[in-house]
Amino acid sequence: MIYFTYNLVLTFILTIYVSYLLIRALIQKDFRTELLERMGYFHYVSSKRTIWLHAASVGEISGSIPILKKIKEEFPANDIIITTMTRSGNETAKKSFPEAKKILFFPIDHPFFLNNVIKKIKPALLLIAETELWPNLIMSCRRLKIPIIIFNGRISKKSFPRYNLFKSFFKSLLNQNILFLMQTEEDRDRILSIGAPLERTKVMGNLKFDITPSPSWEERRIEFSKLLMIDERDLILIAGSTHSGEEEVILEIYKRLKNLFPNLILILAPRHISRIAEVEEILKKKSISWIKRTSLQTNIFERNPHDVILIDTIGELMNLYSLASLAFIGGSLVPVGGHNPIEPLLFKKCVLFGPHMFNFKEISGLLIKEGGAIMVKDDKELYYQLMNLLSDETLRNQIGERGYKIIENNRGAKERIFEEIKNLLFNLSF
């Protein structure tokens, strides 16, 4: 009954929005391509060995890359198709995993569209990063006997009550041909609570601990240093993946710090580049000079005359962290849930974040406990911590080193997850 209601409501919503979607598709070429893919209109000739990986956005894609590389290395005959929910995720997938046979937008989870997509792809295996529980996708795979592996699975404290509210529905949905490879015991307990079978759930650890910089990161660091016109004497504060409500705070703090540290440069990277114009308005109001990343010329190597470098590109933040003196993780001063603090730690950089890190509870908790990062409760504490750390290079290097060692000591999820995927792939008859 709930499954029927879900499809009824979904059909109603699509009926209401169909005119808007069509008009927007006529006006915006990019959206037209996206909408057609979501409706199942794309060309693909199935190889009957296709592995379909779905990862919602940038974070999930980045975490999935080590697994995809491993699969392609050991199963080169298998084509890999990737679907994402967001444009930034789509772009990241194209840059990070060009070996993919096709990179598409995730189809609308309605039988009318979804069945067409599955018929084209004919996946031998569906891999879902973290926890994207789309009812029609799961039911269609069950009907066609397509196995599903949910890897690096997590059920956040915020989303758990919503899943629990429809526990009876999810119990029937999750009791399918799905293997749940969860990050922590807490995640495992939560997925069991909403209906996953005990014998098909395992704890693997967090795949995000296994991300690594690109082999050419040192070359990229030198390139970025020249491109951004950064002098070796400069202090670099990177505020990465910031959200609405954070830029005002960070820029106000930066203005105060600039008076104390004249050679301080802020690299500001909003989480969503669609907000660039909004952030530029904030910079104007604060009377702070800035330049956009895309405005920089590769043949100019003079001293950077601007206070702030505004990052309006996708997929460069990890390598930019190699330039940082300090790194602040966005989405944590406001109740968004934070973003991955591991990327700057790969370069042994000192990391700070706000109190709202519930999307990275395990990682942030471990870093705080063992002194590998600093959590601040508000803007006042952020200012004083930054001032203290900018004054003390030895201290920030020590914190960065501790954070790096914590990451190194917690690697291994990639190998454990891959073993489960490999065992299933060996047992499948193509």
Image (cartoon, helix red, strand yellow):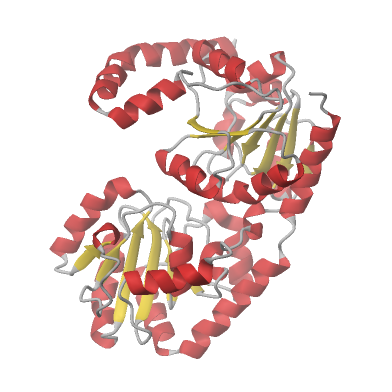
Horizontal and vertical percent for residue 157?
A: 57, 45
Q: Is residue 203 visible?
A: no
399, 64: nearer the viewer: 64
Count the numbered circles shown: 0
Q: Position of residue 421 (x, y in %)?
A: 77, 39
* Residue at image coords 26%, 85%: 262
Q: Quadrant of residue 13?
A: top left
Q: Eyeballing the image, is 176 above or below 239? A: above
What's the residue at 31%, 20% (across, down)? 21
Quadrant of the snapshot with the N terminus: top right
Residue 360, quarter of picture: bottom right
How far across and down, in percent of the image, does residue 260 sit? 27, 87
Q: Is residue 327 left or right of residue 278?
A: right
In percent of width and height, residue 79 lies at: 65, 33
Which residue shows up at 41% across the image and 21% down it? Answer: 36
Vertical placement of 313 versus 423: above or below? below
Whether residue 395 is visible here, answered yes or no, is: yes
Say which of 92 and 201 sits in front: 92
- The image shows residue 371, relative to residue 243, as above or below, that is below
Outermost front residue: 299
Q: In the rendered view of the protein, which quadrant contains the C terminus? A: top right
Q: Which residue is rendered at x = 73% and y = 37% of the image? A: 180
Which residue occupies the foreground of this view, 319 or 288? Answer: 319
